[in-house]
Each structure stands twice: as C-alpha cells, then as structure tokens.
Image (cartoon, grey):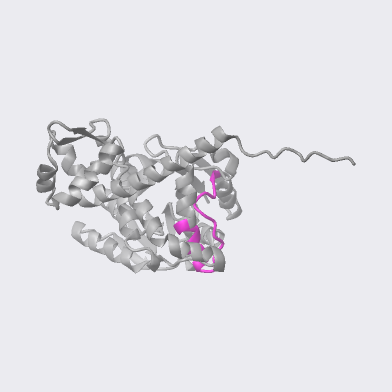
C-alpha cells in the first residue's frame, strides 16, 4: 500500500502578519488622532495652546473657556500622539513648537482644519456602507456642516493666493481690471466670487450653485463688503444655458462632484464668448491608480470620494466620476468639451490641486 504525503500547509510569513497588525494598530491610533485634532480645531484648543507657555490642564481650560475634565483627557491623546509635550513633574503641557504651524492659524498650513473631513466621513460611514449594498448615493443634505467645512478649507487658499497668484494663471488680470463678465460655477459659499469682485470692481461676477445654504452665505458676505458687482443664482450647472455670456469662467474643485461632468463642461464651453478662458481647479492626482501609490494623501482622496464626492453624484443618478478622476482624464474631457487649447499648471503653495487653463 502506498501513501502520498500531503503537501505541507503554507501560510503567511509570521513576521509579515506581525508587521501588518502593527500597521493596523498605527492606523487605529492615527484615526483617533485625526478625530481629536478635529476637536482641537473646533474648540479652539490648538489656537489657545499656541499662545501659552507650559500650562496645566486647568490653565489651558480656563484660557480656552472649556471644561477642564474634557481638556485634560484630550491633552492625554495629544501627548501620546506626540503633538503636545508633557512635563510630569510640573503637570504642564506645551504644544510642540514644530507642530504649531500645522494646527493653528488661518493660513493654508493649518491641517487641523482638514481633519473635519475625517469626522464628517465618520458621521456618514454607516449610510455609505448601506449604499455599497443598494447603490445610489447620499444627497448634500446628508452631510451636516459640509458647506462650512469646505468654505473654510478653500477660503484659506483663496485668501492667500486667489487674486495675487491663481487668477494670473488665467492670463485675464488686465481684462479683469478693465471690466469683463465672470462666472464661478459651483461657487459654494461664494467667497471666491466676493474676493474677485472686491479686487476688480470694473468687472461683473455671477456665482452659480444649487445649494441654497451656500448662496445665502455668499449674498450675505457680498452685502457686508458693499459689493454691487457680485450676484448669486440658484442653478444646477448641468442646466446652465447661457450662450456666449462670459469672458472668464472659474470652477474650484467642483467638476468631479457633478452628476454629469461632461455636460457641465460643454455648458461652460458654450457659455464663454469666443476667445474666452476657463480656469478649472481640481485635484492633482493621476487617473491611474498605480501612479498614485506614492501620493502622500492618496488614501484620503479615495476615502473622501467614496464618502462624499462620488456619492453625491450617484445620488442624482450621475456618473460618479469621483475625486480621483485624475489630471489625464480631466484634460481629455476638457478637449472633448470643445476647448481648443488646454494647459495644466501647478502652484507650489497648493500641492493638492492642478490648475487647468482652457481657451475657447
């Protein structure tokens, strides 16, 4: 009788299993840090810490006008995350000076503000998981506070760079000074429109969006600034039917959210006068997954796409283009929309976005 020895059972390398488990523990801690950092931004704790010398939890809580017990527990998380230094002998806390620029201030360097996207994704994760089973997506109303989060995030870039750095990429600054017609499609809370209208009083600016909460904010800001050359209209960009009405059209990180982005791009092309310019700002990533492996924030981009950008498009029966549609596809779609020339530009101060200048 002959017997055949069974093939030896092979499994994953134990050291690889241990390394993977360690990575997942690190992800667990980093995810928790993101939540705590978003709380630090929302409560003003980072701003308070940035102004204080080494201080006790009570002193920090008093300075921030917050409850000491919550502050003390939050500080524990910040210390173990290596963002805040702790002196056990004196029971004092100090924001690491090297960390302070990344968690405080109103500039683009403040990454604590971006942590709000993480907590928002957490709020909707259960509903998104259901959409994996049923298809479709969530509507804008399912994202509480999204307009404010996005406005604060983009506003920091626009305050620092829109007039002095971004608009010159379009080649239209002289014409803006003389007076032209400008539209911003998907204007959100309208801050970009109002900044441009203030800087170029001879030009006329129209902001389009279908999210009424944002339009209300834009109109209120325009009124506070005394702008009579900025107006806001409620409109789905897929239904924009202006023909040769604008000399310059801008879109800031909004095309990939659209239900039917190709239609929107064709509408924008039609709305420009001959020789008009389209300045489109969108995520700087590759259309090819393999090319995004070394992009530092790639996982965040795919996560926010799954949780928001792709989902809101699918909720409208849309194409679900997604956040990471990529520079290659974006350039191709612009040409398909009819633009005769497309140039892709970068800004050193905004590594997250690519700047597309398309000419009719």
Q: Is residue 277 visible?
A: no
Residue 316 is one of the magenta-drawn residues: yes
Q: Nearer the viewer, residue 52 or 285?
A: 52
Front residue of 267 and 215: 215
Give residue 80's position: percent from left, percent from top.
29, 38
Could you say which quadrant of the image residue 90 lies in? top left
Would you say 132 lies left or right of 192 here? right
Q: Is residue 104 left or right of residue 28?
A: left
Name which residue lies at 59% across and 40% down. Answer: 290
Residue at left offset 50%, top offset 68%: 316
Start-end of magenta stretch? 307-327
Q: Position of residue 360 (x, y in %)?
A: 53, 51
Residue lying farthest to the right in this orientation: 1
Instruction: Please count the marks in the image.
Output: 0
Residue 26 showing in the rendered view: yes
Q: Is residue 35 left or right of residue 320?
A: left
- The relative height of residue 191 versus residue 33 in the rendered view (above or below) is below
Q: Nearer the viewer, residue 67 or 49?
A: 67
The residue at 49%/68% (across/down) is 239
Q: Residue 109 in magenta?
A: no
Quarter of the image for the N terminus: give it.
Answer: top right
Horizontal and vertical percent position of residue 71: 18, 48
**Could you tell me residue 282's position as x and y percent?**
46, 48
Q: Residue at x 58, y 52 (%)?
A: 333
Q: Is residue 303 left or right of residue 319?
A: left
């Amino acid at each position: 009788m002959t017997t055949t020895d069974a093939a030896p059972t092979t499994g994953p390398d134990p050291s690889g299993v241990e390394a993977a488990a360690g990575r997942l523990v690190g992800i667990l801690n980093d995810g928790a840090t993101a939540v705590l950092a978003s709380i630090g931004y929302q409560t003003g704790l980072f701003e308070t810490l940035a102004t204080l010398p080494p201080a006790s939890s009570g002193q920090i809580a008093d300075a921030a006008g917050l409850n000491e017990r919550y502050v003390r527990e939050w500080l524990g998380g910040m210390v173990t995350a290596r963002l805040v230094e702790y002196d056990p002998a004196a029971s004092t806390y100090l924001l690491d000076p090297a960390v302070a620029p990344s968690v405080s201030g109103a500039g683009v360097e403040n990454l604590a503000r971006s942590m709000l996207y993480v907590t928002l994704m957490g709020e909707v994760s259960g509903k998104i998981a259901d959409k994996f089973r049923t298809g479709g997506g969530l509507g804008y109303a399912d994202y509480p506070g999204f307009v404010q989060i996005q406005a604060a995030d983009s506003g920091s870039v626009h305050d620092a760079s829109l007039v002095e750095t971004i608009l010159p990429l379009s080649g239209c600054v002289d014409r803006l000074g003389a007076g032209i017609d400008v539209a911003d499609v998907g204007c959100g809370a309208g801050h970009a429109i109002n900044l441009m209208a203030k800087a170029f009083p001879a030009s006329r600016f129209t902001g389009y969006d279908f999210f009424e909460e944002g339009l209300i904010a834009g109109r209120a800001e325009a009124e506070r600034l005394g702008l009579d050359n900025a107006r806001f209209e409620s409109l789905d960009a897929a239904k924009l039917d202006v023909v040769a009405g604008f000399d310059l059209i801008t879109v800031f990180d909004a095309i990939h959210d659209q239900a039917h982005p190709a239609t929107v791009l064709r509408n924008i092309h039609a709305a420009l006068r001959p020789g008009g310019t389209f300045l489109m700002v969108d995520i700087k990533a590759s259309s090819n997954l393999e090319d995004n492996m070394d992009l530092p924030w790639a996982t965040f981009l795919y996560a926010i796409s799954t949780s928001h950008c792709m989902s809101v498009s699918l909720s409208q029966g849309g194409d679900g283009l997604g956040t990471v549609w990529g520079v290659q596809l974006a350039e191709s779609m612009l040409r398909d929309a009819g633009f005769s020339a497309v140039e892709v530009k970068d800004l050193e101060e905004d590594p997250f976005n690519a700047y597309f200048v398309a000419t009719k």
